[in-house]
Image: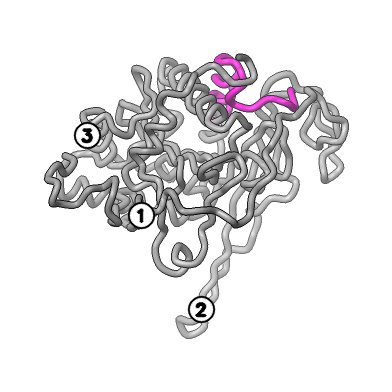
Amino acid sequence: MPLRDPDSLQLQQHPHRRLNLLTGEWVLVSPHRTGRPWQGQTERPQQPAPVSYDPACYLCPGNPRAGGVLNPHYASTFVFENDFAALQPHSPTAAMDCGGLLIAAGERGSCKVVCFSPDHGLTLARMTHAAIRHVIDTWTVQSAALGAKDYIRSVQIFENRGEMMGASNPHPHCQIWASENVPNELAKELHSSEEYRRRRGVCLLCSYLALEHELDERVVCANDLYTALVPFWAVWPFETLLVPHRHTGAFEDMTDAERDALADILKRLTTRYDNLFEIPFPYTMGFHQRPADGSPYPDFHFHAHFYPPLLRSATIRKFMVGFEMLATPQRDITAEAAAGRLRPLSEVHYTLR
């Protein structure tokens, strides 16, 4: 429970550390710095794409992609192999080890692009519930197909939204990278989940979600089957964690009702993000699901992370530099204050008001 003793640690006033239960890493929180002046770099506010079709876009229907392949005239979602894939299925699997100092190993995999819609100007926040549900169905099919490959152990679905997050094209899309080995962040979460179950006998995220609902300090929005909240250990200013209420491990475990509820919560959360500063809010978003090697991983609880970079306005972003890169991530605005900013925002997109 929150500390109430006025002589003890006050999380909204005093510098302190918070432990990320999913990774075992710490974040430094400095709430007294929220009023510091800013004379650093400012960003150009992003604007919605003005057209539903861009003849220069390599993801729009009927257009040639960067590699020269013509897109079909698709009408809903469209999936294709990334023309410049970071992972390839036929890479050599040999390894090298020079005295334990220079170590490398081949990594096989597959990379796909999923266009959410043929409409160049849309985002998840401005798509219909039915259209988002179709995207979720596509994620489910693709995840299962890639995970069924005998050499794939992990399927990572993620979206980089906005120029600030490195998106090379504004057309609504995400990527799926399937890799031969479990990547770093998922490996940390698997270990933490297993250790928590070993020590406490229960699921880490099930227990954490129950506590967050009891305290009701960091919940942003919820429906009957999912909750979006600012995690206690958040690093990015308006970071959120999306957690299903039922203990489930992967997309393929979801019921129809859970897919509908996921579409609902995704739209409600991303609309709040856009409404915060009344811009197409940049973020990196991704789903963490159990490894795809056929083992059940009963301790792991499916969830999604949203990592938005904006700090106090549409033009001021959070930079991970200095102490963050060399020592420990640090934030000024507390998780509770961030949730308090997001929670009361309208679920009607600002462009429709």
Left or right placement of residue 310 versus residue 36 in this view: right
Q: Which residue is mark 2?
A: 97
Residue 30: assigned label: 1
**Mark 1 or 2, nearer chain start:** 1
- Residue displayed at 86% across by 35% down: 56
| Relative to 107, residue 231 above or below | above
- In the rendered image, the quadrant that contains the C terminus is top right
Q: Tell me the CA gap for discs 1 and 2.
A: 43 Å
- Element at label 3: helix
Left or right placement of residue 314 versus residue 304 in this view: right
| Relative to 223, residue 100 above or below | below
Q: Amino acid at mark 3?
A: Leu
- Element at label 1: loop
Residue contact between numbered discs 2 and 3, judged by CB atoms under 8 Å: no
Q: Amino acid at mark 2?
A: Asp
Residues in magenta?
119-140
- Residue displayed at 15% across by 45% down: 200
- Residue displayed at 38% across by 34% down: 339
Left or right placement of residue 92 versus residue 260 in this view: right
